Image (tube, rainbow, N blue to C red):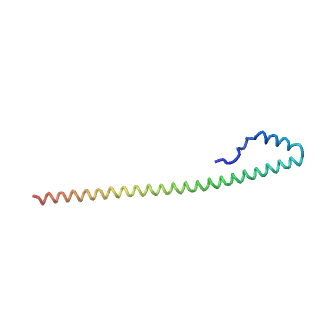
């Protein structure tokens, strides 16, 4: 879920840029401001990632509830189907018995 640059990896250009910035107080302030800006961006990305995670968690829980309801409904419908099958089977067997009685 990470986006953008990885935390611990610095390019040679970054290292050169940082070593140059340590030469004067003005440059140090510039580096500090740059780091503060990068920190703010990272915090904003983290906040967006947390919000996205919360939304996905909410949707997952909603889907779990939906699946649970569907499983209950499926169980109920299967039971009703088997009950209806038994009734039809009983009706046919009693009808067959009556038909045998009429033939005699």
Residue 80 appears in which quarter of the rendering? bottom left
Please state the horizontal and vertical placement of residue 22, each as a whole percent of the image.
86, 43
Instruction: Identify which residue is drawn at 76% across, 50% down.
Output: 38
> Residue 104 appears in which quarter of the rendering?
bottom left
Name which residue lies at 87% across and 47% down: 27
> Residue 25 in the image: x percent, y percent?
89, 47
| Number of numbered discs visible in the structure rendering | 0
The quarter of the picture where residue 44 lies is bottom right
Q: Nearer the viewer, residue 40 or 78?
A: 40
- Relative depth, front residue between 93 and 19: 19
Residue at the spot x=34%, y=57% of the render?
A: 81
Outermost residue, left direction?
104
9 left or right of 23 in image: left
- Does residue 98 appear left or right of residue 25 in this picture? left
How far across and down, in percent of the image, does residue 28 sit? 86, 47
Which residue lies most toward the front here? Answer: 13
Q: Position of residue 21 (x, y in %)?
A: 85, 44
Residue at horizontal 67 percent and vertical 48 percent from the top: 3
Residue lying at the far right in this picture: please name it. Answer: 24
Residue 13 drawn above or below residue 37: above
């Amino acid at each position: 879920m990470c986006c953008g640059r990885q935390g611990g990896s610095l390019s040679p250009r970054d290292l050169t840029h940082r070593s140059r910035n340590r030469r004067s107080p003005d440059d140090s302030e510039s580096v500090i401001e740059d780091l503060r800006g990068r920190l703010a961006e990272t915090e904003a990305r983290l906040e967006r990632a947390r919000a996205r995670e919360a939304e996905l968690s909410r949707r997952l829980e909603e889907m779990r509830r939906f699946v649970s309801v569907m499983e209950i409904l499926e169980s109920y419908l299967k039971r009703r189907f088997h009950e209806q099958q038994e009734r039809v089977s009983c009706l046919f067997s009693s009808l067959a018995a009556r038909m045998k009685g009429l033939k005699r």
